Image (cartoon, rainbow, N blue to C red):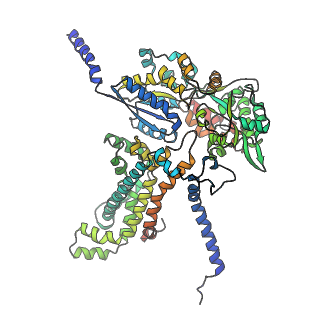
């Protein structure tokens, strides 16, 4: 009797591929600026060509609308099968993502080729929920023409904070009380790197924090340093001003900022700039500490995916060596996450790739845990805004929220 | 004899204040129009220029190839006209019931209906999405249109207006043998053109600007409305501002047209009856 059942099961299993030929439908969602889209499209068409039985519907949305739609779809128990995502622990904590460890173990996916530290920001409580696409490594983009004109020596790769500040000062062009060109522009979310470069921390642990540490002297000093560049030296626009002027890319392209610290995607954005520019390693801390960002966006599977087997097949291609190589060789680039793969490293041939690859070794995983987004929005960002606007010193502002943040961490 | 309170200086002062208001409210439109034909490098230039010396009229061609703008425009028109007509019909019929029919529980029912006005639309997005999705209406016109086919605001607006119609007219019609549908169609509706016009403008303009719902229920570019299509021009790292402004100029054109056409009834509707200044 048992044998009969087994045989029936076996013959059914044998039939399965034939029925699967009928068409497996998958939905794949991602965001991206127009320049970033070709690798996504190439991956989908390559995969469909190799798997004629799979039909992939893509849902593309720009960054600004992507998460509004995705959050609604996921909250409704619907949504794409495979999607590009960030802030992974928040989604994982809501049970919206499929844990990937078992799939990885069963299929022998080469997860060891990834930077293990980077994987932590895609995990929650030890389980992996997404496979990173890139490392979001930053570098210092600088306007070579502006350096020559101001008579400033270009960055030699060993600049520390004070060298950067000095250069920013020399590059800043003042017209009366107005700044015609800032020396430097930063992204608003880059401050944790500076804290780390100074030997400080945001929390005692980036992934399972129990203590808020941003009120400690080293961290305070770093935040104050950024605040001073904005308000004392006035060599950097406030983040609000930067945003109103179209963002750091726009400031750099319109030559209203001579240096900008940003990720590899700008290699594409700046490709047609009407001046000569180059890329240098990030500044180091005052004691020479090298720290860069670690942890970019990744690919996850919907916990409610209809056909998880097919979704995993596609996800493992997308996040695997071939997919990574396609992303790495794209012009609007990102430092590939599968850094242990020779094929992927070689495919990453963007200009200044060596600078980005070397910098990616210094990655520090940014805080990433389930209620990090809430804590940031409620406490940390408002406190930082007071520093950026010069209304409070870093010491006052960051100490003021310690009780509230620690209370939230304890929850 | 001069009318009291009329005096040249005061008039000029009022003109000056009004002119300042005109400049403040037209400024952004002028800026949008000016930016739409600027070269990229000039957008954030300081000091800012209003009139560029190097107009890029090509943007008005490029917008149709950069994004499916023509299709999105048609989608928006279809959706907004359908919603406007649906709201005019549904709201006026509901308002007729609330204003002209006597039935038990009318006032409590109306209060509950009004309470729906207090619920912010963001709260109902997910249940609405679940409903529309289970009906299989993602990426369809009915998915874009039907959730907005009624409006408690519109019902409220029309009910207040219908209440100002003299009861005698309705009673006279009743005595002449009119059924309710005839009173509605031949008495109440023709007398309420101002309020209906105001509601039509409200409905059209608010749907034309609606972004959240079309963003969520459309996943294919062919079904996107103008607002969603334009948002695709806004990048994470860089935005083509002149092109975005070109799209915006074209996108506000129908709203301005509707407003000019309906201007008279809009103002009349706003100030009509017991509805006061709201």
State the residue in front, B37 or B235: B37
Whether residue A73 appears in this view of the structure is: yes
- Residue shown at the point (31%, 42%) measured from the top left: B135
Q: Quadrant of residue A372?
A: top right
> Going by the image, does B224 lie left or right of B32?
left
Question: As drawn, which residue projects farthest toward the bottom?
Answer: B1
Q: Is residue A305 left or right of residue A206?
A: left
x, y (%) of residue A120? 55, 23
Q: Quadrant of the N terminus of chain A?
A: top left
Image position, residue A367 (x, y; %): 59, 29
- B190 left or right of A192? left
Whether residue B123 is visible: no
Q: Relative to B101, does residue A322 appear above or below in the rendering?
A: above
Query: Where residue B210 sits in the image (x, y, percent)?
Result: 45, 51
Q: Count the marks.
A: 0
| Residue B14 x/y as whole percent | 62, 73
Q: A48 or B110: which is nearer to us?
A: A48
- Splitting the image into 4 quarters, where does residue A192 fall? top right
Along the viewing direction, whichever of A36 and B163 lies nearer the viewer: A36
> For the C terminus of chain A, which image quadrant?
top right
């Amino acid at each position: 009797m048992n044998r009969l059942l087994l045989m029936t099961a076996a013959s059914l299993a044998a039939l399965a591929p034939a029925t699967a030929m009928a068409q497996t439908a998958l939905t794949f969602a991602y965001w991206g600026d127009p320049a970033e889209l070709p690798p996504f499209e190439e991956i989908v068409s390559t995969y469909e060509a190799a798997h004629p039985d799979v039909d992939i519907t893509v849902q593309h949305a720009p960054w600004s609308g992507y998460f509004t739609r995705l959050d609604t779809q996921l909250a409704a128990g619907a949504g794409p099968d495979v999607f590009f995502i960030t802030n992974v622990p928040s989604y994982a904590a809501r049970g919206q993502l499929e844990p990937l460890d078992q799939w990885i173990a069963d299929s022998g996916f080469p997860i060891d080729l990834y930077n293990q530290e980077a994987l932590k920001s895609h995990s929650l409580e030890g389980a992996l929920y997404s496979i990173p696409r890139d490392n979001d490594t930053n570098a210092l983009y600088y306007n070579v023409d502006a350096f020559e004109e101001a008579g400033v020596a270009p960055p030699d790769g060993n600049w520390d904070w004070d060298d950067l500040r000095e250069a920013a000062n020399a590059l800043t062009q003042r017209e009366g009380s107005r700044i015609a060109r800032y020396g430097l522009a930063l992204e608003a979310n880059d401050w944790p790197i500076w804290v780390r470069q100074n030997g400080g921390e945001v929390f005692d642990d980036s992934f399972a924090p129990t203590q808020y540490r941003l009120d400690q002297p080293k961290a305070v000093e770093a935040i104050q340093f950024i605040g001073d560049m904005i308000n004392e030296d006035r060599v950097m626009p406030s983040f609000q001003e930067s945003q109103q002027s179209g963002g750091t890319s726009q400031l750099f392209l319109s030559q209203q900022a001579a240096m900008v610290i940003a990720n590899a995607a700008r290699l594409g954005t700046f490709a047609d700039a009407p001046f000569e520019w180059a890329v240098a390693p990030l500044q180091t801390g005052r004691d020479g500490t090298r720290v860069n960002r670690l942890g970019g966006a990744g690919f996850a599977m919907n916990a409610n995916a209809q056909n998880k087997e097919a979704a995993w097949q596609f996800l493992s291609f997308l996040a695997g060596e071939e997919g990574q190589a396609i992303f790495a060789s794209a012009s609007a680039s990102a430092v590939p996450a599968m850094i242990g793969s020779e094929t992927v490293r070689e495919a990453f041939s963007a200009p200044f790739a060596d600078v980005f690859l070397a910098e990616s070794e210094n990655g520090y995983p940014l805080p990433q845990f389930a209620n990090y987004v809430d804590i940031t929005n409620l406490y940390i960002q408002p406190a930082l805004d007071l520093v950026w606007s010069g209304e409070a010193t870093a010491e006052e502002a960051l100490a003021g929220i310690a009780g509230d943040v620690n209370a939230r961490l304890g929850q | 004899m001069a009318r009291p309170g009329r005096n040249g200086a005061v008039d000029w002062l009022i003109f000056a204040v009004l002119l300042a208001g005109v400049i403040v409210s037209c400024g952004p439109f002028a800026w949008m129009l000016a930016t739409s034909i600027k070269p990229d490098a000039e957008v954030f230039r300081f000091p800012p220029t209003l009139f560029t010396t190097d107009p890029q009229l090509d943007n008005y061609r490029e917008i149709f190839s950069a994004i499916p703008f023509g299709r999105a425009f048609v989608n928006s028109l279809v959706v907004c006209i359908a919603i406007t007509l649906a709201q005019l019909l549904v709201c006026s019929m509901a308002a007729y019931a609330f204003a002209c029919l006597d039935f038990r529980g009318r006032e409590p029912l109306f209060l509950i209906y009004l309470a729906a006005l207090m619920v912010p639309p963001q709260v109902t997005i997910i249940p609405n999405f679940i409903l529309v999705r289970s009906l299989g209406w993602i990426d369809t016109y009915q998915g874009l249109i039907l959730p907005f086919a009624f409006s408690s605001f519109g019902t409220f607006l029309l009910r207040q207006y219908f209440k100002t119609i003299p009861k005698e007219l309705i009673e006279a019609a009743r005595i002449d043998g009119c059924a309710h549908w005839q009173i509605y169609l031949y008495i109440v509706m023709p007398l309420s053109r101002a309020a209906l016009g105001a509601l039509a403008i409200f409905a059209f303009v608010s749907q034309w600007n609606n972004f959240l719902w079309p963003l969520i229920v459309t996943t294919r570019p062919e079904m996107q409305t103008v607002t969603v299509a334009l948002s695709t021009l806004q990048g994470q790292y860089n935005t083509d501002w002149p092109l975005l402004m070109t799209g915006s100029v074209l996108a506000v054109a129908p709203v301005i047209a509707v407003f000019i056409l309906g201007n008279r009834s809009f103002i009349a509707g706003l100030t009509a009856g017991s509805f006061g200044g709201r």
